[in-house]
Image: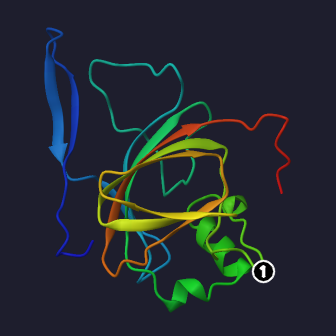
Amino acid sequence: MNQSQKTFRRVITGHDADGKAIILSDAPPVHTQLVGGPGGPTFFEIWHTSETPVLIYPQSIEPDESGLVLAPPRKGTRMRVIEFPPEGEEIRKLTGADAAAKFKTMGDEKASTSTEGAPHPLMHRTQTIDYGIVLEGEITLVLDRAETTIRAGDIVIQCGTNHAWANRSGRICRMAFILIDGQFTNEFALH
């Protein structure tokens, strides 16, 4: 993580032996990964659940998962924070194969939808509902036929749409994401 960026805490609560609410952990996120090398986004994996309704234990333990995984577990959720650096030429020049390779490092090569003439080389789509909250900075949400710039305090409800994030601001953008596993209805023709 860039040392000039503010760090943040992940506070996990639970219960003591008497059933009283306590703080189990108060520290920066444990799982952090730079994706795609220098100039790529930094992912801070906060928490995930494996089912809904989620089972709540008195002493919540860190969900076990090795490596970065783009989507939430089947019937589960995932929370992460991503720091998007300003987008450079190395992103704009990615080929479809390059984009697929980047998504493969996140465990979901099939999410990549990059094609010749796409509005952005990192277009992707998952079967999820995502709540994206801009914490700091600004970023452009790129869709197949539209784009909009969102700023600190803005919230995006991403409903399984093909999209990419383009940081054209010249400074880091930090976003929080809550991903909820979903399933496309038969009315969708996936391509």
Left or right: 184 as drawn, with respect to 5 = right
Residue depicted at x 67% and y 57%:
162
Mark 1 Cα within 10 Å, few/some/many (few <14, many 20+)? few
Nearest to the observer: residue 125 or residue 140:
140
Residue depicted at x 65% and y 75%:
99
Q: Quadrant of the N terminus?
A: bottom left
Left or right: 152 as drawn, with respect to 23 = right
Q: How is the image coloured?
A: rainbow
Residue depicted at x 61% and y 71%:
122
Instruction: Name the residue carrying label 1.
Output: 116
Q: Quadrant of the C terminus?
A: bottom right
Quarter of the image for residue 4 reads: bottom left
Across and down, in percent, residue 93 comes to 61, 89
Above or below for 54 versus 74: above
Left or right: 36 as drawn, with respect to 125 = left
Across and down, in percent, residue 27 comes to 17, 48
Nearest to the observer: residue 109 or residue 128:
128
Nearest to the observer: residue 57 or residue 95:
95
Dot 1 amino acid type: Glu
Above or below for 121 versus 25: below
Most distant residue in the top direction: 18
Quarter of the image for residue 159 reads: top right
Secondary element at tag 1: loop
Nearest to the observer: residue 50 or residue 171:
171
Across and down, in percent, residue 50 comes to 52, 32
Residue depicted at x 73% and y 65%:
113
Across and down, in percent, residue 124 comes to 65, 62
